[in-house]
Amino acid sequence: MFFKRFGLTLFLFLTSFVLFSQTISQREKDDILSDIKKQIKTISAFSSENLEMLPVYEFQIEGAENILNKYQEYTSINEIYAKWIELKTILEQNKEMINFLKPRIGSWFYIKAVGALSNNDSINAIDYLNKAIKYEPNNVMANYELSKISLDSGSIVRATDRLERILSRMNPTKQEELLCQNLIAFAYDKNLLQALSLINQGKFAFAVDILNELDAFCQKDIYSICNKAIVKKNLDFCKNGIYKDHIKISQKAMDIKRDDIAGDFVQNTYDYFQKNRESITDTTSFEGLVKSVVSSYMGQIRELSLTNNDEAKLDLIRKTKELASMLQGKDEDEILREIASLQGKDAFIDIKLDSIENAAPNKETFNKDYAQYNQEISNEQAQKQVKEIEKEYIVSSDNPLPEKSLLVEQTKTKTLRKEIDDKFYESRTLMSVNNYEKALEVLEKANRLARIDAEKSEVDKMYTSAIREITAKRMSKAEYCIFQGEVEKADSLVSITDDLIKTYKMEDDPTIVKIMNSYLKVIDQKVCQKKQDEVDGYVYNIIESIKNNDFYKADLLISTAMQIKGSSECRLDKQKVRQLKRQIEKPLQYVELKEEILKKLEYKDTLDFIKSYAEAEDFWTNNALSQTGVEHTPLRSILVNFGNEDLIIKSIEELVKYRLYFGSLEALGALKDLGYKRKQTKKAQKKIGMMMSLDLVKRSDKIHQSNMVDDKYKNDKWFKYFYKSYKKYLIKWRKNN
């Protein structure tokens, strides 16, 4: 009986505990219902017509599942259970829909793209096709349609690359394969005919873009569609045409007296020639044009020498020097001598900067140090060749097995005696860990083992391959050292590479020459860029020094920046440094003047100090040094700090005597600050106003003076007597002058 009663009590206790655990406040219940309802609304909005939202739907499904799991323990409450089960049902239905549609979404986007194409909506079509490929990378027709669009936009290489990828990787049907092959052939024919049409119309620049694409396509034409000779011939023809067009436009600009436009076109023409010098042979007309533009500029420089327009003159001199460098030799020397003589007449600040720059020691470039490898190629060609060399010799994550490395070359060797093959394998292993010296020692042992001509020939091949790979790897590392700023390390790497080439007498090997020439050119460009970055860094520090009013430091930094030198192939842009030098010229002059003035206080010549300080203040005002942030304590504040009224009155007399009128007015202002009434200074104000008005100066200076008087004293009632007197006698001055 006891156990029955105990069991009943336990049952009632557990039942009440469960009921208690499910009891929640009305606010908590409302929050739970609100969360579930939000998810029901979200999941109910899924639509099979809006598959672009599929990633969002998947995310929302995950959120809904989290809500179901979170509130499952509250399903014993009827209201919550009703909504919970509703959400679960809708979720399962929509998950089935998503799982059905997901594998078909690529095809759905492709169908949308076809619809857009039929409506000539290429922008949306491209978007849909890219989405189709994202979900189905091997969707043949989506890739095919994108190839057609690329072809229409002139991107022949992109179009043919995609078509070749379809043929080689996507297992197209026979019909799809034929479509792709026909489009590749059509791409070549259409664009070649379009280029020829543009050439006939004289639109060489447009034709070049197409021909460059065709040329790139021809380099990897696996279907033998291209006629490389025709493409190359027309490409050279276009480049000559563009070059001649540049000269015609420059000459027209000269004819209408627009030398500035002609100068810009000459510079552009020179840059174009440098990039395409293999295709352009006749440069006589260009040289004549450069001489004409330079001659015109020199005439303008002579005219500007008679004026004070230093800024315009310096700008023209800089442009003339740049153009003269295109002529070289005797013509360039004569122009530079004439510029130097013109600069010498006016003692421009550029003379000082030029002398600093010229006095700096020359650092020969890598190209000049190893001139035996130097061939005439443009910077663009050098960069292109370096990329090819890296593909052939340099291991990377994208290129684990370079096509001309020793590893690949060994697989091409004939089967030799085991001891020689073993040496080849050992040298290859040593090369893979960059132990070049040991690898060459092992090849030397292989050479000693070789007995017959066939064996010796194979060893020689391995030697050649190893030297080429070592050269490429070391030069690649040297280029990287330049990138890191380790110029000395790069220099050392180039030097030991050169020694290796000489030791094995491979200076005339065309591959070695190509590797060295390309890398030396690219390294020289990087050194040049580092030097330009260094100059730009100095510019930043100069500007900071100017902001801090440290003009001496700015001047020192300018001198140091001017000593950074490029090379004959590396023109550094120091125009900003020169501009900053001109910018600090007056502030520096003011600071030096101020230092000399402060020394006068050491000799206790106070009146001389005040007179000199007033002159410095005029200099500061007239050169608008306040706009450049140059700090200046007004004379008025200094006199107030002296607090000596007799000294101030004597200063006024002294400053008027030396015609430092604004200084005398500042001294009057000091009396005002010390508590003087304007009537007490009436006579002094009237006298200064009269003398200042009648002072004989240039008309432009008088206008400047009058404007300053208006700005400073027109609305200051304390200076009423001065202002009236000044304006009264100014009328008289105007009548007399």
Image (cartoon, rainbow, N blue to C red):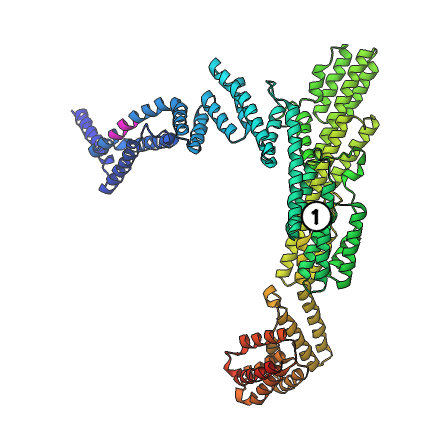
Quick one: SS at disc 1?
Answer: loop
| Residue type, numbered disc 1 | Leu
x and y percent of residue 707 in the render? 56, 74
Q: Is residue 626 above or below residue 154?
A: below
Residue 403, quarter of picture? top right
Residue 736 visible in rendering: yes
Image quadrant occupied by the C terminus? bottom right
x and y percent of residue 661 in the render? 63, 80
x and y percent of residue 560 in the render? 73, 54
- At 26% across and 36% down in the image, what residue appears? 37
Residue 235, quarter of picture? top right
Range covered by the magenta-colored residues: 86-91
Q: Is residue 648 above or below residue 200?
A: below
User: Can you name the residue that lies furthest to the left here?
Assistant: 1
Give the tally of numbered discs: 1
Residue 62, quarter of picture? top left
Residue 677 visible in rendering: no
- At 60% across and 84% down in the image, what residue appears? 688
Magenta stretch holds residue 2: no
Question: Main SS of the magenta segment?
Answer: helix
Q: Which one is nearer the viewer's eye here, 47 or 605?
A: 47
Does residue 490 appear to the left or right of 649 in the view shown?
right
x and y percent of residue 287 in the render? 74, 44
Does residue 715 appear to the left or right of 279 in the view shown?
left
Q: Which one is nearer the viewer's eye here, 536 or 206?
A: 206
- Residue at image mark 1: 572
Q: Residues within 10 Å of mark 1 (few under 14, many from 20)?
A: some
Image quadrant occupied by the N terminus? top left
Q: Is residue 346 above or below residue 668?
A: above
Does residue 361 appear to the left or right of 637 in the view shown?
right
Q: Which one is nearer the viewer's eye here, 124 or 102?
A: 124
